[in-house]
Amino acid sequence: FTDPFSWTVTGHPWVAQEWLWDLGLAAAWHGGLSAIILWGWAPAWALWPILMGIYRQAGGADPRWWAVSGFLPALSAVLFWPIRPETATYLAFGVLLYLIARVRAGDWRWGWGLPLLTWIWANFHASFMLALVFIAIEAGLAWIPFTFGRIVNPPVAPALRVRWLIWLALSGIAGALTPHGLGFYQYAVTMSTDNPMRHVITEWASPDFHAAFFLIWLLMGVGGLIWSWQSSEPVPAWWVIYSVGLTYGFLDSVRWLPYATVATPLWLAPLTRRQPRTIRWV
């Protein structure tokens, strides 16, 4: 009932935050090493078609970007992500973005999948809080249409605004439907803000840009911002919020990089429809 392993929280209550993933791992164990590897990598392969769907639902118009927006992030998952519950977390994050993109594209029925996703995710990993954050962002945008320069957040139907609040409330309830109840929320917040853990564990630290993969992703982000700025079309408010939020998270902690990678198709889709202005180099 208490943690005997971690020196930072010795004696604190033990929370089996990944119990559902552990059950699948235990079942895979009986199938040998191949079954364990399959269980660990299956979410990465399942992520590929979901990423492709995100790109299409978000309005991606150029099929030449499909490989970049879908296959490459999924392949990076197989090559770089270890056999840990985080792989299922990245898959859940991809499904979250897909459901949001479907609702934003006009098919609001997919929004009812958000509470179900949150419930399953909460029993896989404490990072389910991301679902509530993104649903809350969408709910806020639905209720606050605005235009700020070239950043535009168009109004939505009143019925959809109410549905976003309902989905947010149901998802909040679903996140507590775990063996740990409401205490799981406290655990999730405490774990993500624990300063000793953030200073000791490498993946919680800021990225080292001597690593080529980190530098490439940062350059892609800067390039996308320049491309968006040079185009004459309005910039969706959700695109700005997601881009800035995930980039800030990545600069704060390496742990955010996979989430930013999964969001690649959502980030690229609006850019592929843009025609940049003529840039004159002096």
Image (spheres, helix red, strand yellow):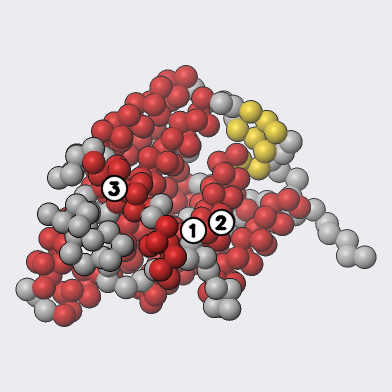
Answer few, some or many: residues within 10 Å of disc 1's Cα (few below 14, many 20 plus, some between 14 and 19).
many
The total of numbered circles placed on residues is 3
Residue 57 versus residue 11: which sits nearer the camera?
A: 11
Pinpoint residue 18: horizontal percent, then vertical percent. 21, 57
Label 3 sits on residue: 187
Give the image quarter of residue 224: bottom right
Amino acid type, callout 3: Tyr
Please state, as top left, top right, bottom left or bottom right, where the C terminus lies in the image.
Answer: bottom right
Measure how far apart labels 1 and 3 are at the Cα level: 24 Å
- Residue 278 place in picture, x, y as percent: 83, 57
Front-lying residue, 230 or 29: 29
Residue flagged by tag 2: what amino acid is it?
Thr
Whole-number angstrom distance, CA of label 1 to CA of label 2: 7 Å
Q: Is residue 76 above or below residue 173?
A: below
Tell me if label 1 and label 2 are in contact, CB under 8 Å. yes
Name the spot of residue 15 as percent of width and height, x first. Answer: 20, 53
State the residue position of label 1.
260
Q: Nearer the viewer, mark 2 or mark 3?
A: 3
Residue at the disc numbered 2: 247
Q: Real-space Cα distance between discs 2 and 3?
A: 25 Å
The residue drawn where x is 41% and y is 37% is 135
Q: Is residue 266 left or right of residue 96?
A: right
Q: Secondary structure at mark 2?
A: helix
Q: Nearer the viewer, residue 51 or 151?
A: 151
Q: Residue at x 17, y 79 (%)?
A: 34
